[in-house]
Amino acid sequence: MTLTRRTFLTSVSALALAPAAFATGAGAGTPFDRDTVIAEARDLASRPYALRPSVPQAWQDLSYEQYREIRFRLDKALWFGTKTPYNVDFFTPGLYFPQAVKVFEVENGMSKPVGFDLSMFKISDKVPELPVDETLGFSGLRLRTEMHRPGKTDEFCVFQGASYFRAIGLSEAYGLSARGLALKTADPDGEEFPDFIRFWLERPAPGQRNMIVHALMDSPSVTGAYRFDVTPGDDCVMEVEATLFAREELDHVGLGPLTSMFLYDQTNRTRFDDFRPAVHDSDGLMIRNGAGEVIWRPLANPKTLQVSSFVDTNPRGFGLMQRAREFADFADLEAHYHRRPGLWVEPMGDWGKGTVTLVEIPADQEIYDNIVAYWRPATPYAAGSEVTIGYRLTWGAEPERTAMPRVINTAMGDKTFGDGRVAVIDFEADEMHDDIEDLDIFVQSPHAETTKGVLQRNPETGGLRLAFSFQPGDHQLVELRAQLRKGTAPASEVWLYRWTA
């Protein structure tokens, strides 16, 4: 598997752009509801996969700097200047987006196309003259509503590139992404990336708090009809309903897939000569399994591709989190990693047997998304089958909390005296940990000898710190597990870690 270039939505969408009524197709439109998208997905799946036409080569040859010089005029946003509580901006194709998507506005159950017009964009003189033909359309869209500033809109959600999308809660900066579907992630024969090829945007009524986005997905092995019910706020919450139609047998499907970046922290700091203490969009995978156990797995940037599978039945949720929340954790005045959201996936209904799968890809720069997490069903989807799933996505600073004291930091290094490695785990301050004498330490590894562990109060955090050492020996991979308990009852999350040589 190879690294994929990080989409630069943060750079594009953070531009200070300039929003007037938006031109849509003439006429009364055509009837539309969710069944319309399902019917289109079913019809697509009945036919061989066909590549969409690419935009003219001049658009594809744009440099990164030139692409950034094409800026959407905010007064051209869909529904700008109306009582509709949302505006929609659009992105041009080109550069990393060689194919356009079709966009439709839906009002009163009728759909009309949103036409592409170059006058929607402010183009600097650094950009060469670009041809306009029937292949042109948009590469994606951005949702805005009133959030921070009364009477003014702020962006909170972007759909752009393949089936990628991202969102933020209040006062956050774009970080990790979600996808409609992951296929064959980390497989030796390569990954398949489905595309959202059409969007339908339901016009919200005045005062409406949520917005509905529909999307049609296409790929060589599967099609899909997606419905996103999006509600912005302190956390951005999306309820997702997807109906999938398999062209071929799908033996490696990723549901609720998340994609993020982890370069380094205190577990691998010595590998990077950088002024910043840490660089990552997410620092851990959190799982609440079907038995109610809460697992925290700090992320790693290994030297070789690593895939971890957490077997479960009917998971209650999983997500990639950013628990480092202070500026000093990163000391980055530009990237603002301390403001990146976490993202929690909560199944709606039973997902059966399968695994929460974590893929960690070696990376040497922060421009690469090298972390993927998703639910992989145990049973493949047969060719010709139809599958409907539902789940809730919550984007926010802390989108999922549990009653268990959380792990707030993990650090590792060589043992000061003697051979081996030292692992240090900091837990947040919690009344459950007021009396250290009541707590039992459990440290285990199937691969290496570990010490019993030492528990101390950390005066900086007010919480407890657990430190233990382990001997990797000749092992290239060592799985570690630790937890605090009071008798037979858990007194912390389960900490899991995969050390690699």
Image: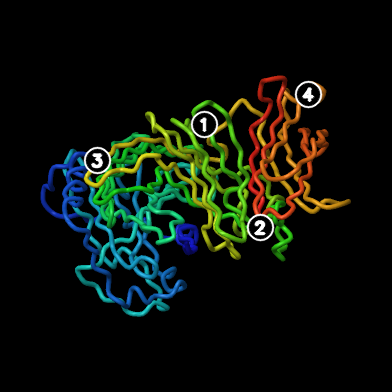
Give the Cα separation between the discs numbered 3 and 1: 26 Å
Q: Looking at the image, which is closer to me, 215 or 320?
A: 320
Q: Amino acid at mark 2?
A: Asp
Instruction: Give the labeled residue for mark 1.
Output: 289
Residue at 74% over, 53% down: 473
Instruction: Give the labeled residue for mark 3.
Output: 386
Q: Position of residue 479 (x, y in %)?
A: 65, 44
Residue 231 falls left or right of residue 403: left
Which of disc 1 and disc 3 is earlier in sequence? 1
Give the Cα separation between the discs numbered 3 and 4: 52 Å
Q: Looking at the image, which is closer to me, 342 or 210?
A: 342
Instruction: Give the labeled residue for mark 2.
Output: 332
Which of disc 4 and disc 1 is earlier in sequence? 1
Q: Amino acid at mark 1?
A: Asn
Instruction: Give the labeled residue for mark 4.
Output: 434
Q: Amino acid at mark 3?
A: Glu
Q: Residues within 10 Å of mark 1 (few under 14, many from 20)?
A: many
- Label 3: state its secondary structure: strand
Q: Position of residue 464 (x, y in %)?
A: 77, 33
Q: Of the residues tagged 2 and 3, which is closer to the observer?
A: 3
Give the Cα separation between the discs numbered 2 and 3: 46 Å
Q: Looking at the image, which is closer to me, 280 or 2?
A: 2
Q: Residues within 10 Å of mark 4 (few under 14, many from 20)?
A: some
The image quarter in which residue 333 lies:
bottom right
